[in-house]
Amino acid sequence: MNSFWKYKCNNEVEYFFLLGVDIDSSIQFMETIFVGSRYEVNVDLKHVFKEMLDKGIYQFCVAHNHPSNSIRISSDDVLLTESINDLSIKLGFTFMDHLILTNKTFNRIPISRV
């Protein structure tokens, strides 16, 4: 899995990853579900949740890379995280984490648990 991150994080565009997690917190699948440009990736939440429903997974993490190698959390990152969390709660999913990845490190985007 480490080589997967290194490969994707060294590219010139943003990728959005979905990781399905089972009841024991083991990763069941990891897929690139969106590919963007150098500065953004558009995420369709319907597709995110459809992927999990199709696979029978109700716990998940998401991640995206920053080709700039900055782990700074943008306002768009926060809005996306909040949208995913809100929809997860409404649909009965467990949203575990949202990570920003670079080729050297990562950052976690805080999730409001209210």
Image: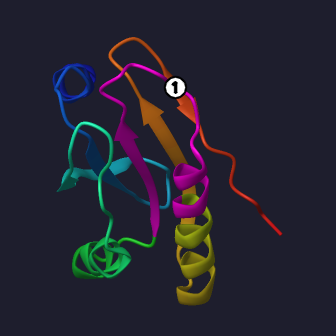
Residue 85 position, x and y percent, is 60, 69
Q: Quadrant of residue 38?
A: top left
Judging depth in this view, the residue of 112 and 26 nearest the camera is 112
Residue 94 position, x and y percent, is 56, 68
Point out the residue furthest to the right here: 114
Q: Is residue 53 above or below residue 38?
A: below
Q: Is residue 91 above or below residue 27?
A: below
Q: Which residue is mark 1?
A: 71
For mark 1, does the 10 Å Cα neighbourhood hold few (<14), some (14 to 19), or many (20 or more) residues?
some
Colour scheme of the picture: rainbow
Q: Is residue 85 left or right of residue 59?
A: right
Q: In the rendered structure, which segment of residues is drawn in magenta? A: 59-80
Point out the residue furthest to the top here: 104
Is residue 66 part of the magenta span, yes or no? yes
Instruction: Say what secondary structure mark 1 lies in.
Output: loop
Residue 70 position, x and y percent, is 47, 22
Is residue 17 part of the magenta span, yes or no? no
Q: Quadrant of residue 60?
A: bottom left
Q: Is residue 105 left or right of residue 90?
A: left
Judging depth in this view, the residue of 1 and 74 nearest the camera is 74
Point out the residue furthest to the bottom here: 90
Q: Quadrant of residue 15?
A: top left
Residue 69 position, x and y percent, is 39, 19
The residue lying at 26 percent from left, 76 percent from top is 47
Quarter holding the C terminus is: bottom right
The residue lying at 55 percent from left, 80 percent from top is 87
Q: Is residue 24 left or right of residue 89?
A: left
Quarter holding the N terminus is: top left
Q: Amino acid at mark 1?
A: Ile
Judging depth in this view, the residue of 29 and 8 nearest the camera is 8
Count of numbered tags = 1
